[in-house]
Amino acid sequence: MRSKFFKIHELVPRDLFETIHEDVLWRMIPTEIIETIDKLKETFSNGSMTINNYFWDGEREWSGLRTKGSPYYSSGSQHTFFNAIDAVFSDYKAEDIRSYILSHQSRFLHITRLEDEVEWLHFDIKETGSSAIVLFRA
């Protein structure tokens, strides 16, 4: 499955984008992640939703998959397992997006956790044993 809105370089770090075929990289991404980023972009359609932007000389490279080469790598991070995404929106505040998701959980069935009190949207699909989305602080 491929995203309707995002290119593969927006989800993986530069070294993987430059060395692994795009088809292989798309197969590495859980369907739940792709469906969720597409649903977020459809829902918050004004302006941009940025995950990684290094391809355009931006500063974000580690907001999707994080490998051992990442300065933000942690062996227990959901980013390490491709179960998490960090995104920034040009026209929406992260707190407003979190509030919307929490109020409309039935529209975002794959999101299990949201990081609270950060200026970006972090969501992940880690199994929590709960049917409700869990807010957490890193």
Image (cartoon, rainbow, N blue to C red):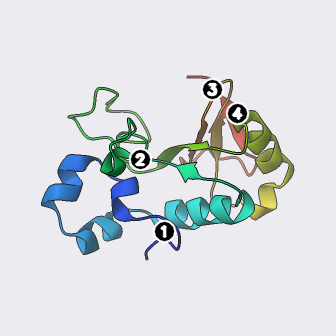
Which residue is drawn at the image coordinates 75% and 34% (left, top)? 95
- Of marks 1 and 4, which one's residue comes earlier in the chain? 1
Residue mark closest to the camera, 1 vs 2: 2
Distance (Cα) linking label 3 and label 1: 25 Å
Image location (x, y in percent) of residue 37 = 57, 59
Percent of width and height locating residue 63: 43, 41
Identify the residue shown where x is 62% and y is 23%.
137
Residue displayed at 57% across by 67% down: 35
Query: What is the number of callouts on the image?
Result: 4
The mark closer to the camera, 2 or 3, is 2
Element class at badge 1: helix
Determine which residue is flagged by label 2: 52
Q: Which residue is mark 4?
A: 135
> Which mark is first along the chain, 4 or 2?
2
Q: Residue at x 38, y 33 (%)?
A: 76
User: Which residue is at the far left?
Assistant: 19
- Tag 1 and tag 2, C-beta contact below 8 Å: no
Q: Indicate the amino acid at tag 4.
A: Leu
What is the spatial separation of the Cα atoms under label 4 and label 3, in whole angstroms? 11 Å
Discs 4/3, front: 3
The numbered dot on residue 118 is 3
